[in-house]
Amino acid sequence: MTSDKPIKVTLLGIKQSKLGNKFIFNGEVDDCEDCRLRGACLKLDQDRMYEVASVRDTVHTCKVFEEGVCTVEIFEPSYPVTTGAKLAVEGANISFTPRDCDKIECPHYSHHCCPIYLKEGEKLKIIEISDESIDCKQGFQLKLIIVDRINSDGK
């Protein structure tokens, strides 16, 4: 649900501009340097995940996306991450700590335990505790939780 999430307007490649599509903003590339639409694209936070809430019909040419870009409304979604089973309390505020793990082949490693879109120490609010079981290759007792990032203004 997006009603309680701040909406941003940006430009996104036509192929990526699908309702519900999630993407990680990787930042500026060389071809963006002299683009007249640069400001519309580059107001997102690098390495942060976003979800498309709506797609507008406007299409612009772009050096990065061959098919062009269109205007989209996006928001920062809730994130599924792992935490120690004893720390999984719905409604609690926690600081994100990536797992100390070297099992990069594990399906949970980059999506739940060490995602690039969350930084160590970021404040998170646990909004749900998932029933999905986590089979940890390191033997940690983990729970999958759904969190929202708490901005510096407390929201």
Image (tube, helix red, strand yellow):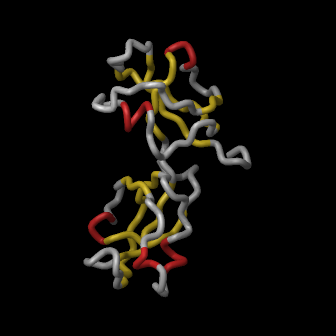
Q: In this image, 92 relative to 146: left or right? A: right
Q: Name the spot of residue 50 as percent of width and height, x first.
A: 45, 55
Q: In this image, 94 relative to 16: left or right? A: right
In this rendering, the answer to whether 134 lies above or below 77 is: above
Q: Out of 128 and 69, give the one closest to the viewer.
A: 69
In this rendering, the answer to whether 126 lies above or below 88 is: below
Q: In this image, 104 relative to 113: left or right? A: left
Q: Name the spot of residue 100 as percent of width and height, x first.
A: 48, 25
In this rendering, the answer to whether 122 lies above or below 33 is: above
What residue do we see at 31% from left, 74% from top? 65
Q: In this image, 105 relative to 148: left or right? A: left
Q: Out of 126 and 62, give the one closest to the viewer.
A: 62
Q: Out of 56 and 25, give the one closest to the viewer.
A: 25
In this rendering, the answer to whether 138 lies above or below 76 is: above
Q: Name the spot of residue 61 as percent of width and height, x first.
A: 34, 84
What residue do we see at 63% from left, 32% from top? 95
